Amino acid sequence: MPKQLVLQGKQTKEDFLLLYKKCRDLRLKERYHALYLSFMYEWEEIATILGRDYQTILEWAGLYNENGVEGLDPDRPPGRPSSLTKDQISEVRKIVMQCPRDIGLRFSNWTVGSICKWIAGKFGVALSGERIRQLLHAIGFSYVKPAFSYILADRKEREEFLSELTEISSNGTPFLFEDEATVGQHPTLHGMWVLKGTKAKIRTFGNHAKRHAFAVVNPVTGEKVSMVAKRLTADTFVRFIDKLAGTISGDFTLILDNSPCHKANISLERLERYRDRINVVWLPRYSPDLNPVEHMWKEMKFNVSHNHMFDTVNRLGWGMIGYFRQLKPETVRSVCSTDYLFGKL
């Protein structure tokens, strides 16, 4: 190959930089880097920068000119097509929209690797992992974490609740959501920053000691009332209701789920005592997704129990109390927004 070899593809300098940044395969990443550098340096200079043989760099450029971006994939089998037809792309879209088990495969989630294998087996086309990612984005896919869909939830009950909530909101009546969460002394794990070459280790006793949080939030004003307790029982719920009634002034609607501690006789009797001030509305069964306080528990666990073990369960409790104390109204309004609920109507 001549030293003056010029790239023939349509990719720009910025395209190769983006491919380089997103690529996870170190071998392919190096090839993207080389072609990115070709917009600024001669091939011999690039070979020196990367510590590679000059001929190797030219071979990479030649592979790109012959087969496009797919030709750079070091795992690409020779002699196989490097692109899909429009009909084949349409079929890929239909397949990826389905659960693999629903079409007879023995796994539950699509990965870039499994899609590569399916395409190779179905169409005899070899595509790199980076090309698959590009293709998926191009045909409308994005990689997201799904939400639960509770199959036992009654659709009519959910619609009636959302209609009632809309009416309460339009009348200007304050409405508050309540919920409980349990946090264990055994820490929960979450991604974290560590120095390269080191392993992240989180200390734990491996025990089952825990504390329980009760919380009520006003998603409009950001007002909150919380309590941390040793037990999650009807008795502690009653104590929390007394605290709530003594903290929130005026009349308001309290939205509760169907937890046994809420429906216990002692709890219903205490709620009845405050009926002149507190109007209770029950969430539909099997519908925790309709309670915005659930989002606050994720924030609390991230700030309290993820990747950290408290030496004693009492310190865990104080950590939870500290979280609530520093929680600002604007944060509550943001985390516990009900906009997504009204969007369900």
Image (tube, rainbow, N blue to C red):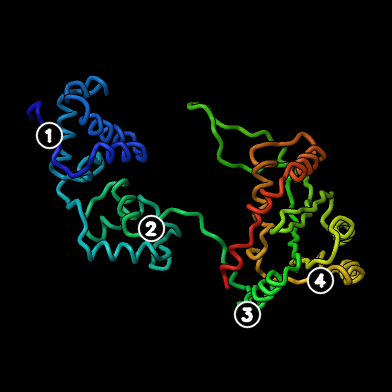
The reply, left or right, for residue 27 in relation to residue 146 is left
- Mark nearer the N terminus (3 vs 1): 1
Residue identified by numbered label 3: 156
- Marks 4 and 2, Cα distance to the nearest angstrom? 44 Å
Instruction: Of the two numbered discs 4 and 3 on the same chain, state the one appearing first in sequence.
Output: 3
Label 1 and label 4: CA atoms lie apart by 75 Å
Residue 238 placed where, x, y %? 88, 61
Looking at the image, residue 121 lies above or below residue 308: below
Horizontal and vertical percent position of residue 60: 18, 34
Q: Quadrant of residue 221?
A: bottom right
Q: Earlier in the sequence, mark 1 or mark 4?
A: 1
Could you tell me how far apart the alpha carbons at marks 2 and 1 are, in whole angstroms?
34 Å
Looking at the image, residue 154 sits to the left or right of residue 281; the answer is left
**Disc 4 target residue:** 279
Secondary structure under badge 2?
loop
Q: For the N terminus, which image quadrant?
A: top left
Mark in front: 4 vs 3: 4
Q: Nearer the viewer, residue 93 or 327?
A: 327
Q: Amino acid at mark 3?
A: Lys
What numbered label is drawn on residue 141? 2
| Quadrant for the C terminus in the image | bottom right
Q: Toward which corner of the image does residue 256 lie, by quadrant? A: bottom right
Q: Is residue 236 left or right of residue 283?
A: right
Look at mark 1 in the image and give the residue it sits on: 6
**Amino acid type at image mark 4:** Asn
Q: Nearer the viewer, residue 304 or 207?
A: 304
